[in-house]
Image (cartoon, rainbow, N blue to C red):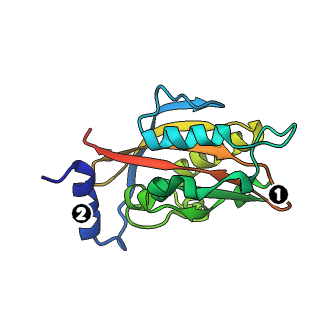
């Protein structure tokens, strides 16, 4: 018997992903601003990633680690949950994914990579874009991690509940990165 995640992946593969159906709803189930609530985070991989980010070396007086402190080889078994957001020149609407993990693509993107500038112009997805942008901007501005668990749903599909972290890094000359790991599971509500 297939577990629910495998059944969902199989169903996704069987669907024609060039014909997206509109989102019904985005609902925040749990969130934490400026902290990582390890006791409430459901995905052990996200807990491990969050703890590793907290332990990353920081230079004197810097609240955030530098991007070169991030070593992806520590996370080989969970690399498909990694997304990276990049903001150029400190401008909020330049925020875009520079890396989008397979797990997030399969479950949140319905088999396709999500592009934030496209979501911003899509009336069905603009609310989710604003939520992502707001959380990433808060992480950057407050130099602190963010946590959210929320649901997405499309026409006849079950709700996909997912957790996400926003883990900011120090800016370099022109851009700033935010590690945005995502873990999804399927629920029938």
Query: Is residue 124 visible to us here?
Result: no
The structure residue drawn at horizontal position 58% and vertical position 32%, both measured from the top left corner, is 36
Horizontal and vertical percent position of residue 39: 48, 25
Are there few (<14), some (14-19), or many (20+) residues within 10 Å of tag 1? Answer: few
For the C terminus, give its image quadrant.
top left
User: Which residue position holds label 2?
Assistant: 10
Whether the residues at callouts 2 and 1 have beta carbons within 8 Å, the answer is no
Which of 81/76 is in front? 76
- Say left or right for 125 vs 121: left
Query: Is residue 128 visible to us here?
Result: yes
The structure residue drawn at horizontal position 70% and vertical position 36%, both measured from the top left corner, is 144
Which of 111/168 is in front? 168
Residue 154 quadrant:
bottom left
Direction front: furthest residue: 74
The structure residue drawn at horizontal position 56% and vertical position 53%, both measured from the top left corner, is 74
User: Which residue position holds label 1?
Assistant: 172
Horizontal and vertical percent position of residue 12: 29, 63
Are there few (<14), some (14-19), or many (20+) residues within 10 Å of tag 2? Answer: few
Horizontal and vertical percent position of residue 172: 82, 57
Secondary structure beneath label 2: helix
How many marks are shown on the rendered structure?
A: 2
Could you tell which of marks 2 and 1 lies nearer the N-terminus? 2
Which of 93/102 is in front? 102
């Amino acid at each position: 018997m297939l577990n629910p995640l495998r059944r969902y992946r199989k169903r996704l593969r069987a669907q024609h992903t060039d014909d997206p159906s509109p989102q019904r709803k985005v609902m925040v189930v749990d969130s934490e601003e400026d902290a990582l609530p390890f006791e409430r985070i459901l995905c052990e991989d996200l807990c491990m990633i969050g703890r590793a980010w907290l332990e990353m070396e920081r230079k004197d007086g810097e609240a955030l680690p530098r991007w070169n402190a991030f070593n992806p080889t520590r996370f080989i078994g969970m690399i498909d949950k990694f997304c990276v957001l990049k903001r150029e020149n400190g401008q909020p609407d330049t925020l875009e994914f520079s890396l989008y993990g397979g797990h997030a693509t399969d479950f949140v993107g319905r088999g396709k990579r999500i592009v934030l500038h496209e979501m911003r112009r899509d009336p069905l997805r603009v609310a989710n874009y604003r939520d992502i942008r707001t959380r990433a901007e808060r992480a950057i501005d407050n130099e602190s991690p963010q946590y959210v668990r929320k649901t997405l749903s499309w026409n006849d599909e079950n709700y996909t509940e997912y957790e996400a972290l926003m883990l900011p890094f120090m800016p370099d000359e022109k851009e700033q990165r935010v590690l945005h790991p995502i873990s999804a599971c399927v629920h029938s509500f």
